[in-house]
Every structure is written in structure tokens, then in C-alpha cells.
Amino acid sequence: MDDRGRELADFLRTCRARVTPGQAGLPEDGRARRVPGLRRDEVARLAGVSTEYYTRLEQGRALNPSPEVLEALAGALRLGASEREHLTDLLARPAPARRAPDGSQRVRPGLHLMLQTLDHVPAFILGRRTDVLASNRLAREVLTDFDALPAPRRNLALYYLLDPEARQCVGDWERIAAETVAILRLEAGRNPHDRRLADLVGELTLKSPEFSTWWNDHRVLRRTHGAKTYHHPLVGDLHFFYESFQAPGEGDQSLCVYNVEPGSETARSLQLLTSWTAPQPDTLSRPEPGTPRERQVRDASGDR
């Protein structure tokens, strides 16, 4: 079995294991279950295909099912939208290797201008492999200063999973980090020959204690909206409602905006943070010692 077939087999098995007979509307038949979730013959029956055909699918030996079979499988396995997309990628992409583009992504001037316009909330442009391609000042204050990092390290997955500060600053860190792994898993199914993505997965496997467990769960996610909380050392907890939009004309780039309720405590905290951290003309050419966050704490406390 090649890598493509192995990935498909693992994904189908993990999805099958997550669905109980009760969830699928199947009566108990009294047979002992050697594995959790549904059996192959039960998935086949629910999808309206033969057990032999489904077994071939799960063994990676039938890679071009019809759209009707794909839909039936998705229903039988109770797949969400991201999981259906991933299954389609694994089953329907052509067999010959197609390399993902390895060149650096560029953000067009209009999107940079949009980030500057959104100066009252954190916002950034996310590219392939969760690379942070551009960010506004509040995004760098609330998350981390991506601009201060070497270009290859400006990556959201590296920040969440490898930066010790992220574990302290990101509310519900485990959920957010696991969701980020699921986003990478979805992209890996779409671009299986992306060498830079493979290198990123390799680094995270070696350096993050949790990554392998989440990666092997085969969960996938396309993040579109939700809620996040960050803790900032100057202004405390910040609560956001984020939205992610595909940038027009840029299929591999997303605009991520962390919105806040007008008049909320978080909105007031962001205004305070903006005023405290605004660059001063007399300090632009004479940076003080210490990290950006250490300088912020000193400035806020008056310890100059």
C-alpha cells in the first residue's frame, strides 16, 4: 500500500471507530466487538455498497468512487464538512505526484492596506501551512511579534505548539493547538507532496509532546469562525470572536480578524493597549534592552 492508500485507510478506520451503532441507528446484534465503533460490514450497509467494495476502499485499493458513493460514505460515517472535503481529497485526487508550490507567498499591497485599516483589532493574513504572511500591530501585541522572527518561523502552528509563552497566553490552549493540527492535517490531504509542509510536520513531531497524538487522530478542520481568549500581561484576559475569510483572488491566503464586542471590557483593554504600546518617535532609533513584552511591562509600570 502506498502513502496515499495508507492515509485513506487510517482516516476511514478512525472515522469508523468514532461512530457507535446507536449513533448510526443500528440495533445491537449481540456479536462481540473487537474494535470500537462500526464494523466494516455495517458501514457498507449504511452506505449502500458491498462489504467487499468498502473493504477495498479501506485498504486503499479503490480510489475513484463516484460522487454518489462519496456522499453515501460521508453520511454513513457522519462526517462534517471538513471531513467530507478531506475524504474527497484522499479518494479523488489523481495518482501521479503533483508538487505543491514551494515558493514564498506574497501579500498584495491592498491586503497590507486592509490590515492597517483594521488597526483597532488584531488581524493577520494566513497562508499555506499556517504561515503568518502579514500582521497588524495589535496581532503582534496580542499573539507574538511575528515580524521579529525569521521568515521561516512566522507560523501559527509553530507558535501554538512550540512557543512556551503560547501555553500561558492562549486560553484553552489544548483545544486551540489540537485544532491547528487538524488544519494542517486537512492541508496535508490536499497537498500530499508539499515538502515544506512535510518538514513542518516532522519538526512538530520531534519537538511537541502532544503533536503525534493529535496528528494520528486524523481529525481535520477548516477554521472559519469561533471564539478565542488570550491573556496579555498588561491588560489581562481578552475575549475575541474571530472570522476567517479567503482573500479574494488568493486561494491559499486567508484574512483572520479578531473582533470584539463594542463597548466591552476587551474593547476598552485594546484601546488601552494601543495607547501604551504605540511607538514613540524618540524611541524608534534607540530601542531599549529586553524583549518587546518586557519593555511593555516596564513602560506600563513606570519602571524606566
Image (cartoon, rainbow, N blue to C red):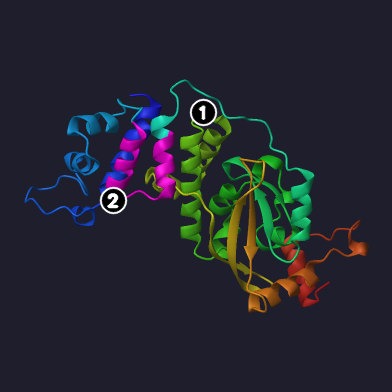
> On the picture, is 78 further left or further right than 249?
left
Q: Residue 192 location, x and y as percent?
A: 48, 31
According to the picture, the residue beneath numbered tag 2 turns out to be 18
> On the picture, is 150 further left or further right than 97?
right
- Given residues 12 and 26, the one toward you in this image is 26
Amino acid type, residue under disc 2 in the picture? Arg
- Which residues are the magenta region? 66-89
According to the picture, the residue beneath numbered tag 1 turns out to be 193
- Mark 1: few/some/many CA within 10 Å (<14, 14-19, 20+): some
- The mark nearer the N terminus, 2 or 1, is 2
- Given residues 45 and 136, the one toward you in this image is 45
Q: CA distance from mark 2 to mark 1?
A: 28 Å
The residue under the point 11% across, 54% down is 28
Which residue is outermost to the right?
A: 282
Amino acid type, residue under disc 1 in the picture? His
Reply above or below: 295 against 34. below
Q: Residue 215 location, x and y as percent?
A: 42, 44
The secondary structure making up most of the magenta span is: helix
SS category of the residue bearing label 1: loop
- Mark 2: few/some/many CA within 10 Å (<14, 14-19, 20+): some
